[in-house]
């Protein structure tokens, strides 16, 4: 009787090695890293185990009575994680339209020079561009919608203009190469328009602002949103870093200076994200707009600005 009890206790204390190929058919010898990983899996499921080194390989040991259950747990773990991490999304070739984008920025600079001239235009005195086009919160809320766009084309001085062209030039060129000029500029104008509208609601009726920076920070938000969509299946560190970088740029560049309109920058950035997310999902599903659609979007964007100034000059 005593002998049977000793045999039973000896059997209960017997530890058996889990053969890697019985868990993962594609597995080779058990490495130290994988042995510790599998041990964590078993311990999380309350299966006792221990690790031993055997020559250059490693062994994962479990009690004989736990062997079958431990193998089942590990097989399930391996199967659920077989395709993790997912493959990184394929990089799309950029659209080579840098010259076109820089040309638009050059026109913006040229328009600033026009607003500073005191010369007759076609026999008529030049209008007061700032009086007609500034993002005046009270007048915007009273129905003068065109100021939401015209304000994006005005700048207080050369320093203001060069700041937006230097920072915005880099960001906008990247965005236009990513999406094509038509889609990029339509999203930029949309984020600038909505950003100025929200800023007008936030401030008192006396608040006034000018500058393309609302759209520039909209571009940052759009790029952050595109990165979020593109890397949505990756680890947190893969898709969060571009977003964090955009927020850091907003904090670094969008809050400095006595005349900085933080509200316009913040709302432009937020609406950029809001427009960039659906645009990103549509790009994943349908691809980038073709040449004709991009040209049409570019034309609509240009006409929107022209129509806004026409409304400002005739009403």
Image: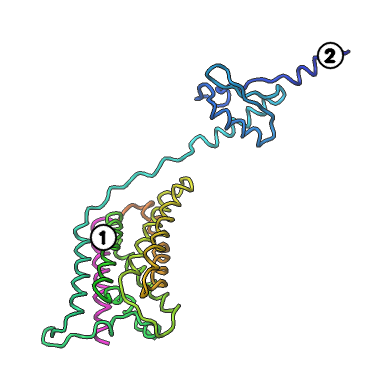
User: Which secondary structure type mostly characterizes the magenta part of the structure?
Assistant: helix
Number of labelled discs? 2
Residue that appears at 55% across and 37% down? 80
Return the residue at label 2.
Answer: 4
Inspect the magenta stretch and tell me whether residue 225 lies in it.
Answer: no
Q: Quadrant of the C terminus?
A: bottom left
Give the secondary structure at mark 1: helix
The structure residue drawn at horizontal position 36% and vertical position 57%, both measured from the top left corner, is 223
Residue 154 locus on image (x, y percent) = 27, 75
Corner quadrant of residue 104 = bottom left
Up-down relation of residue 75 to residue 314 (above or below): above
N-terminal of the two: label 1 or label 2? 2
Q: Specify the segment rendered in magenta.
A: 289-315
For the N terminus, give its image quadrant: top right
Q: Which residue is mark 1?
A: 181
Q: Residue at x 33, y 69 (%)?
A: 213
Q: Where in the figure is residue 159, as x and y percent of width and height?
A: 26, 71
Label 2: element kind: helix
Q: Is residue 300 left or right of residue 230?
A: left
Tell which of 10 and 279 is nearer to you. Answer: 10
Whether residue 133 is visible, yes or no, is yes
Where residue 101 appears, x then y in whole percent?
23, 61
Q: Measured from the top left, where is residue 181 in percent x and y?
A: 26, 60
Identify the residue at the far right of this view. 1
Q: Measured along the vertical axis of the image, is residue 7 above or below residue 27?
A: above
C-alpha span from label 1 to label 2 = 84 Å
User: On screen, 272 above or below 43?
Assistant: below
């Amino acid at each position: 009787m005593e002998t049977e009890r000793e045999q039973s206790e000896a059997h209960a204390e017997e530890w058996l090695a889990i053969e890697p190929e019985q868990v993962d058919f594609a597995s080779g010898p058990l490495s130290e890293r994988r042995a510790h990983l599998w041990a964590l899996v078993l311990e999380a499921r309350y299966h006792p185990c221990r690790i031993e080194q055997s020559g250059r390989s490693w062994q994962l040991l479990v009690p004989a009575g736990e062997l079958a259950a431990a193998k089942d747990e590990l097989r399930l773990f391996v199967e659920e994680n077989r395709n993790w991490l997912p493959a990184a999304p394929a990089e799309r070739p950029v659209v080579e339209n840098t010259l076109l984008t820089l040309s638009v920025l050059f026109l913006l600079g040229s328009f600033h020079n026009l607003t500073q001239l005191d010369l007759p235009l076609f026999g008529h005195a030049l209008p007061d561009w700032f009086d007609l086009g500034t993002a005046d919160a009270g007048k915007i809320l009273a129905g003068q919608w065109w100021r939401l766009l015209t304000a994006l084309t005005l700048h207080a001085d050369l320093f203001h203009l060069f700041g937006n062209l230097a920072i915005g030039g880099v960001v906008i060129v990247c965005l236009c190469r990513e999406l094509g000029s038509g889609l990029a500029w339509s999203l930029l104008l949309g984020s600038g328009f909505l950003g100025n509208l929200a800023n007008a609601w936030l401030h008192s009726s006396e608040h006034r602002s000018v500058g393309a920076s609302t759209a520039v920070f909209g571009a940052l938000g759009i790029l952050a949103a595109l990165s979020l969509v593109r890397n949505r299946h990756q680890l947190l560190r893969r898709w969060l870093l571009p977003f964090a970088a955009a927020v850091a740029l907003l904090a670094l560049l969008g809050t400095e200076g006595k005349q900085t309109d933080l509200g316009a920058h913040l709302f432009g950035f937020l609406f950029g994200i809001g427009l960039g997310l659906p645009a990103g999902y549509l790009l994943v599903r349908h691809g980038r707009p073709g040449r004709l659609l991009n040209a049409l979007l570019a034309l609509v964007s240009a006409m929107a600005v022209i129509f806004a100034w026409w409304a400002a000059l005739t009403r």
